[in-house]
Amino acid sequence: MEHIILFAGPMGAGKTTAIRTLSDIEVVSTEAANTDREQSDKDTTTVALDYGEISITDEEKVRLYGIPGQRRFEFMWRILRERAEGMVLLVHIDAPDAVASVREFIIEFFDLVERGGVVVGITRSDMAPGPTITDFTDALELQLPELMVPVMLVDPRDRGHMELLLMTLVANIETRAAFGATLETEYSA
Amino acid sequence: MSPESGLVAGSRETVSPPPELTGWAGAATAIHALQQMAMPMTLTLDVAEHGPITIDFPFHAFSWDTPFAEFPHDPTSVLVETRPANPEQPTIALPGRPLDSLLWMIGYTAFGDRPAPWLREGDRYRLRRWPALADIAVTLDQVRMTAMLGNAFATADELAAAAHTPPADARRLVNAFSVTGILRRSTGAAALELPAAAPAAEASTGLFSRLRERFGH
C-alpha cells in the first residue's frame, strides 16, 4: 500500500528540506528540462522533483514528492496529483506576496482542498517580518468560507514541526472523510 | 457614618478575589474580553518570577524571555495591564513570537478541567481557523480533536466521545481554543455523531494511527 503526499510551494520555501527531514531514505532528486520559451529565455531550465519516503511497514509507504511550483512544470506532477492523498504547501513568509501565493496554490489544488487534503506551512517566520498568520487564514476564509485549511508556522528543518504538519494533514483528511463539513449558524465564542 | 449603623469606616472585610480573576484564569478572562473589543489593544501580563509578557494583538505576536518549556502552570500571581495599541506601530520588536501558542497554553491551563466561565453548557463549537501550535508540544490526540473541531460543531463531551479521550481533556482543549480566539459557537448545530461509514474502530486502524506508531508518539 502506498500513500502519496505532495510538497508544493514557491522556490525557497523549504520543500526539499522538509522532505529530507521526514524521509527514511536519502532524498532523490530528478531533473527535467523546461522548454517553455515564453516563461524562460534559457533553452533549458533544470528543475528538481524531490522524492523521499516513510516506511510504515515493509508493504506500506508514505511517498513524499516535492514538486516545482511553477505551472509550466505541471506536466511533471499531473499524474502524481491524481494519485495524491494530500499536499503540504510551504510558503516562505518573505516570498513576494506570500498570501497571494498561497491563494493561487489553493485554487490550483482545490480538489485536494475539498477533501481536507491540504495543509499550509509558513516558513522563515522567525527570520523575517511579513504577513501574520491571521493574514493568511483571513484570506483563505474569504476565499473558502466553507472549508478550513490548516495554516501553521513551521521550520522545515525541525522534525517535530514536520511530523505535526504531516499528522495534521492526515488527521484532517480522515476526519473530513468521516464527518464531512457542515455549515451552521455561528457566533463568536 | 454613625456608630449605630454597625459600620465602621475602614473596617471592611478583605477577601480574596474569585478564582476566575486570579493567576492564568484572570489573564484568560482579560484576553477573552479584549478579543471581543473592536479597539486594538496591547496586554502586559506580569508573571511572578517569570517576567512580563507583552502581547501585541494587532501584530499577533508577543515577547517574553521565558521559553515555553518553562511555562509556569500555577504562578503565584499574574498582574494584568491593558492599554490601547496603535495598529501601525508595534509595541514589541517584530517578528516577535507567534501568539497562538501562548494563548493556547494560557487557555489550556487557566480553568483546569472546568469550562471557561463564558462558555455555555450545551453550545457546540467549531474552529474558525486552525491554531498555529508548532512551537509547543501538542499530543496527537489533541491534533485529532482539532481536526474534528475543524470539520464539525461539537460540545466538549461529544468531542471527547468521538475522539475516545477523557472529557476533561476535551474541555481543556475547548478552553484553549476559546482563549486563542478561534472558536465559533452554534446554538442550533446537530450533535456530533460518528457516521456509520466511519466506525469508531477506524480511529485505531487509519493511516493517522499507523503513522503515530511509526513516529513513536
Image: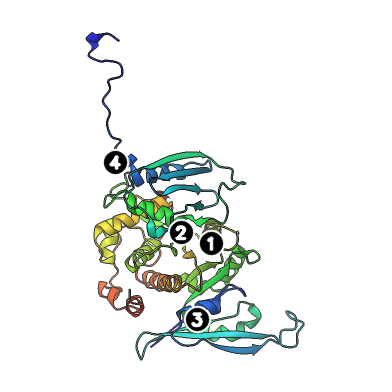
Evaluate whether label 1 is on the same chain as label 3.
yes
Nearer to us in this view, A152 or B36: A152
Disc number for residue A57: none
Q: Distance between the residues labelled 2 and 1?
A: 9 Å
Evaluate whether label 1 is on the same chain as label 4.
no
Which dot, 2 or 4, sits closer to the camera?
Answer: 4
Query: Helix or strand or loop: what does disc 4 sit on?
Result: helix
Q: How far apart are marks 2 and 3 (CA)?
A: 29 Å
Which x, y percent locates residue B174? 34, 55
- Residue bearing the label numbered 4: B19
Q: How far apart are marks 3 and 4 (CA)?
A: 48 Å
Q: Which residue is situated farthest in the right direction here?
A: A41
Disc number for residue B129: 2
Nearer to us in this view, B63 or B59: B63
- Mark 2 falls within which chain? B
- Mark 3 falls within which chain? A
Whether the residues at callouts 2 and 1 have beta carbons within 8 Å, the answer is yes
Q: What residue type is labelled 3?
A: Arg
